[in-house]
Image (cartoon, helix red, strand yellow):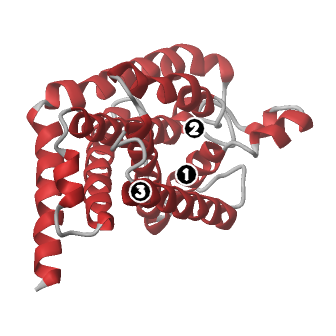
């Protein structure tokens, strides 16, 4: 009986989350596609020919996986942080927390919504990329695994940000001052092999470097880092953020006060 109730609750949250971003697809799906088109035009077509090949690929081919991953990261995060904070702001998150369902079911629903938007935008951006370059998947399992794991990770990050945010402006602080710098310094537009040894070492502390390179390896078969290490690091971050998110929901920190 409990499983049926839990599944119903989970499905309800997922349907709400997916319906939410699909209902306003002009605001959630189209803008990332336009932004990525500009990246491809400026960096790929205008600047790329001056840079030449990178790791045996044209520059636009090389940056395509990074741009796709960037859109997945931003949108899986944005979907959850805005939705969760909206639920907290309107005070109906408390109704879910007092309902006879465990908090991990609530977490699972929001995470699935984040995955759905991240994957949807990733597919759209991939289609856009095909207008500028050729893409082929070298390792299908790695591509799918990295996309899902990355979406889970940043969905959890969105929940934590949503819990601690006190006003709508607060949900843009993490993306602006943390996510954006980490993404741009995460090997999206360059190989860290081009950096001096010191900055290569510094770059390896950036978790997004491992996501971008693992995804690039799945598509192009090249990477600046060890793929197994990338999976381990992403998995560790997922476990840590999941435990933190569950603890915050269980204790009501940032929600009850």
Q: Nearer the viewer, mark 2 or mark 3?
A: 3
Question: Residue visible at 58% across and 55% down?
Answer: 214
Instruction: Looking at the image, tell me whether mark 2 or mark 1 is earlier in sequence order.
Output: 2
Tell me what residue is drawn at x 53 percent, y 64 percent: 239
The answer to which of marks 2 and 3 sits earlier in the sequence is 2
Residue assigned mark 3: 251
Find residue 232 and report its horizontal and vertical position in percent.
63, 66
* Residue 225: x %, y % from top left: 72, 54
* Circle on res. 220: 1
With respect to residue 163, does 113 lie above or below?
below
Seen from the viewer's position, the closer of residues 234 and 82 is 82
Query: Please, what secondary structure does the residue beneath circle 2 have?
Result: helix
Q: Which residue is mark 2?
A: 62
Q: Tell me if label 2 and label 1 are in contact, CB under 8 Å.
A: yes
Which class describes the residues within 10 Å of circle 3: few (<14), some (14-19), or many (20+)?
few
Where's residue 1, x and y in %?
10, 86
Task: Return the residue nearer the eye: 86 or 92.
Answer: 92
Mark 2 neighbour density, 10 Å: few (under 14) some (14–19) many (20 or more): many
Label placed on residue 172:
none
**Disc on the earlier residue, 3 or 1:** 1
Q: Is residue 80 above or below residue 51?
A: below
């Amino acid at each position: 009986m409990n499983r049926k109730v839990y599944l119903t609750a989970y499905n309800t949250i997922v349907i709400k989350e997916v319906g939410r971003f699909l209902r306003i697809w002009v605001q959630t799906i189209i803008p990332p596609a336009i932004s990525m088109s500009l990246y491809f035009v400026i960096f790929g077509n205008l600047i790329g020919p001056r840079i030449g090949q990178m790791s045996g690929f044209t520059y636009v081919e090389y940056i395509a996986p990074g741009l796709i991953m960037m859109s997945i990261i931003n949108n899986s995060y944005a979907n959850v942080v805005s939705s969760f904070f909206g639920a907290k702001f309107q005070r109906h998150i408390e109704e879910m927390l007092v309902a006879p369902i465990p908090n991990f079911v609530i977490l699972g629903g929001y995470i699935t919504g984040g995955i759905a938007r991240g994957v949807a935008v990733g597919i759209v951006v991939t289609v856009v990329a095909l207008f500028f370059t050729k893409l082929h998947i070298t390792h299908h399992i790695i591509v799918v695994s990295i996309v899902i794991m990355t979406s889970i990770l940043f969905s959890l990050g969105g929940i934590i940000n949503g819990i601690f945010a006190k006003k709508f402006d607060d949900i843009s602080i993490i993306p602006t001052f943390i996510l954006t710098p980490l993404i741009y310094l995460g090997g999206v537009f360059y190989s860290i092999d081009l950096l001096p040894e010191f900055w290569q070492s510094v770059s390896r502390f950036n978790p997004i470097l491992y996501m971008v390179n693992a995804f690039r390896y799945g598509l192009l078969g090249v990477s600046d880092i060890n793929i197994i290490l990338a999976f381990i690091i992403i998995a560790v971050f997922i476990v840590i953020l999941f435990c933190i998110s569950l603890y915050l929901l269980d204790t009501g920190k940032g929600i009850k006060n």
